[in-house]
Each structure stands twice: as structure tokens, then as C-alpha cells.
Image (tube, rainbow, N blue to C red):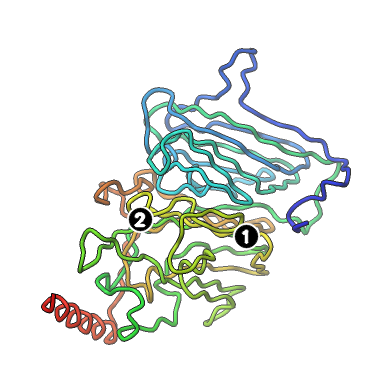
């Protein structure tokens, strides 16, 4: 069996337990209510143990809220730590970016939408099968940053043991990031136009997915892209947002990195763009052609984790040589020996998805980086302009 699974033919000394939102009065109000601006504790465990499964569903207690999956924040703490090891919007943790609901399955995460798929909403069940060990305690919270009460239904399934884990057991972590928009320098350039390419031999301008210090291993990530680009020749057609290479620098190494990819879809183990499928280890949990421009892709290194002893940096180009400006957000999943470097989450108004025309609501921009044009970039942009004008005149 795979090295992250147990051998189900062997008996164990573990004791299996569950904490859930069942109605302790015996009636059917099997949920908890979390008020605006407050956190609700789903589980608090004070034993040696490991969380094996989490199921949850979230809904508004009063009025419909299409962006609840971005406004609710999932937090997890291990061994009485002050800074959470998991800090992400609810939906993004479960590979549902943009506050969009959908159904998909993978080895670590499954979701099932009771509402209309590929739309903003919250009527969706969410499952996590990441193993999450702890030695002293585990605490799981939901922070409600909506303007009204929300209801949470949940199970937290776990095992407890009669002794602690050894010092080689690493703790689960997940971190959300967003840059809206990424700094591009040539949105008018089409992808794979070989005669007007610009080289990129640096991670400097890439979108940063993970920066961690310590000892551990990366087990995957998801990337949500709101495609803001339209074709110069057909403004009703969106251009391909990908071809950005993934780069993983291990233990402070300099260029080139130990792991260098060949394009965005390749990083998610697809080819010729992303397709409308979701497999055990990779796929599209939200597919852009079903949503008019919203894509969430995921990849899990369940059988090939990326090990690091001191540090790890994971990034991806936004377009080749970072030439495109789009809305990027992500969640990285990794295990490491504690302590971890503290990370935060951006304010709720900066987490909101771009809607319909992809106009940016007030305060929604995240990051203000720009890319200084090199002489080669300027030359390529001029070449493309001349080529485009020539084609336009012929048409």
C-alpha cells in the first residue's frame, strides 16, 4: 500500500473517537452557530493522537451568502501553539477557490455540491483525509468574517494512543496566499509564439505559493486563477493563462532550483491546457470553461513528497517570463517539524472573488508589485505590435 496509508489487515492499539456537531438535547439541530467576527471551536483534543478525517458543511443562518467559502476561515493548532499551522479560507482549503461550489474527488479531498455546480454558494459538503498527528493537543476553529451568523455541521474523526509520537513525526500545515493582480508586462502577447519569446532565469517576479523554514516535506498545493486576459483579435475569447513554470528551491539553494517545471498545466500533470477532470493526485476541481474564466487546479505529491531539511520556496510564473496579469490565489499543503514560521491571512475584503466583469471591488487588490521592462521585453512588445497590426490589416 502507499506509504501514507495504513495497512488495514493489521490490528492496532489505537482508540477511535469522533467529535461532531450532533444535537446534545436529542433533537435534530445538528449544527453550531458562529456569530459575525467570532470563532467557533469545532474540536479541542488533549491527548496523544491523529486526526484521520474531517467532514463539514457551512451555511448562512439568516440570509444567503454567495461568498461564505471565502469569508469563513479555517484554523488548526497543534500542541498548544499560539500561531495556527492551518490558516485558509474554508473553500480554498478544500480546493474550491473563488468561493465557488463544485463536486470533485481526490486522494486527500472530496467535495459534493448540493446546489448548482460551478456557481458562487455554500451548499456543499467538504471532506479532508489528510492525516494530522499531534502530541499534546489539537484545536480546530472556524472564524466567521461574514456580516451575519453562520451554521457549521461537522465531524472530526481521530485516533488516540497510549504514548506520544516520536520526534520524526511532522505536523500538518496549510497556508493561503493571493496576489490580485499579478504584475505582468505583456498581456497582449499570445502564448507559445516562439519567435518573440523573452527568457526568464529567475524566481524574482514569480507568484509565491510557499516559503517555509524548518525540516519537512511538501505534499501538494492548489492554484486558483481568475483569467483577466482576452484575445486582441477576439475580445469575446479568453487567452490561455498558463505556461508559467513552477520552481521549487530547497534548503536555500541558488539558481537553478532543484525542481524546475515546464508550464502551469504540466505542474498539475495535465498537458495542452487544463482539462475538465479530477483524479486522485491531480486535476481541475473547478474548470474554467464551465465558469467563464475561473479555474482551480490541484496536485498532490502523495507518493513523491518534496523533502527539505532547512527551507523550501515554491513559486510559479504567471505566463511565460511573468508576462500576464491575472488574479492568483493558492493553498500549499506540507508537513514539518515544529516550530513553523508564523504566517497570516489577508483581510476578508481582499479575499473576495472578482465577479462577472472581473471588476475589482474596493480594497480587493492584493500586492502592488511591478516589473521593470528590459530592453528585450520592449523589443518583443514592439515586434508583437507590428505583427498584430500586420495581421489586422490583412483581415
Mark 1 touches mark 2? (CB < 8 Å): no
Dot in front, 1 or 2: 2
Report the side of 362 relative to 33 (left or right): left
Residue extending furthest toward the left? 393
198 left or right of 81 in image: left
Q: In the rendered image, is residue 221 in sight?
A: no
Disc 1 to disc 2, how far (Cα)?
A: 24 Å
Q: Give the camera-side residue of 22 and 37.
A: 22
Residue for point 56% across, 73% down: 249
Residue 182 location in percent, x, y? 34, 64
Q: Which circle's residue, 1 or 2, is located before the other in the chain?
A: 1
143 sits to left or right of 20: left
SS of the residue at dot 1? strand
List x then y, in percent, for residue 122: 44, 35
Q: Answer few, some or many: residues within 10 Å of disc 1's Cα (few below 14, many 20 plus, some between 14 and 19).
A: some
Residue 78: percent from left, percent from top: 66, 45
Please determine whether, in this image, residue 363 is positioned above or below residue 218. above
Tag of residue 226 = 2
Q: Is residue 115 left or right of residue 171?
A: left
Q: Position of residue 221 (x, y in %)?
A: 54, 58
Residue found at the far front of this picture: 395
Question: Dot 2, how many residues are within 10 Å of its Cα: few (below 14), some (14-19), or many (20+)?
Answer: many
The numbered mark at residue 219 is: 1
Q: Say which quadrant the C terminus sits in.
A: bottom left
Q: Please, is residue 80 above or below residue 150 in the view?
A: below
Q: Quadrant of the N terminus?
A: bottom right
Between 334 and 246, the one nearer to me in the picture:
246
Amino acid at each position: 500500500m502507499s506509504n501514507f496509508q495504513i495497512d488495514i489487515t493489521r490490528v492496532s492499539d489505537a482508540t477511535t473517537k469522533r467529535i461532531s456537531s450532533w444535537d446534545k438535547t436529542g433533537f435534530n439541530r445538528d449544527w453550531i452557530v458562529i456569530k459575525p467576527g467570532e470563532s467557533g471551536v469545532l474540536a479541542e483534543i488533549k491527548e496523544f493522537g491523529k486526526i484521520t478525517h474531517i467532514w463539514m458543511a457551512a451555511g448562512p443562518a439568516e440570509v444567503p451568502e454567495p461568498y461564505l467559502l471565502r469569508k469563513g476561515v479555517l484554523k488548526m493548532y497543534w500542541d498548544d501553539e499560539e500561531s495556527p499551522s492551518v490558516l485558509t479560507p474554508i473553500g480554498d482549503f478544500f480546493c474550491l477557490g473563488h468561493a465557488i461550489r463544485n463536486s470533485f474527488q481526490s486522494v486527500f479531498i472530496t467535495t459534493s455540491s448540493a446546489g448548482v455546480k460551478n456557481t458562487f454558494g455554500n451548499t456543499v459538503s467538504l471532506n479532508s483525509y489528510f492525516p494530522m498527528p499531534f502530541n499534546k493537543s489539537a484545536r480546530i476553529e472556524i472564524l466567521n468574517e461574514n456580516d451575519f451568523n453562520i451554521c457549521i455541521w461537522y465531524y472530526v474523526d481521530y485516533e488516540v494512543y497510549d504514548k506520544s509520537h516520536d520526534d520524526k513525526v511532522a505536523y500538518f500545515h496549510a497556508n493561503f496566499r493571493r496576489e490580485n493582480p499579478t504584475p505582468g508586462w505583456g498581456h497582449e502577447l499570445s502564448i507559445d509564439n516562439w519567435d518573440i519569446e523573452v527568457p526568464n532565469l529567475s524566481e524574482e517576479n514569480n507568484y509565491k505559493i510557499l516559503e517555509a523554514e524548518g525540516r519537512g516535506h511538501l505534499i501538494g498545493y492548489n492554484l486558483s486563477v481568475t483569467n483577466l486576459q482576452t484575445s486582441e483579435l477576439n475580445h469575446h475569447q479568453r487567452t490561455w493563462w498558463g505556461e508559467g513554470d513552477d520552481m521549487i528551491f530547497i534548503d536555500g539553494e541558488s539558481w537553478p532550483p532543484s525542481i524546475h517545471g515546464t508550464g502551469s498545466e504540466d505542474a498539475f500533470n495535465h498537458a495542452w491546457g487544463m482539462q475538465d477532470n479530477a483524479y486522485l493526485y491531480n486535476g481541475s476541481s473547478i474548470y474554467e470553461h464551465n465558469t467563464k474564466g475561473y479555474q482551480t487546479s490541484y496536485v498532490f505529491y502523495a507518493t513523491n513528497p518534496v523533502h527539505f531539511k532547512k527551507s523550501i520556496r515554491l513559486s510559479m510564473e504567471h505566463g511565460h517570463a511573468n508576462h500576464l496579469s491575472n488574479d492568483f490565489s493558492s493553498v500549499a499543503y506540507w508537513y514539518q517539524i515544529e516550530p513553523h514560521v508564523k504566517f497570516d491571512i489577508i483581510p476578508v475584503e481582499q479575499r473576495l472573488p472578482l465577479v462577472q466583469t472581473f471588476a475589482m471591488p474596493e480594497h480587493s487588490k492584493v500586492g502592488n508589485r511591478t516589473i521593470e521592462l528590459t530592453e528585450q521585453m520592449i523589443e518583443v512588445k514592439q515586434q508583437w505590435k507590428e505583427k498584430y497590426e500586420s495581421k489586422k490589416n490583412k483581415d
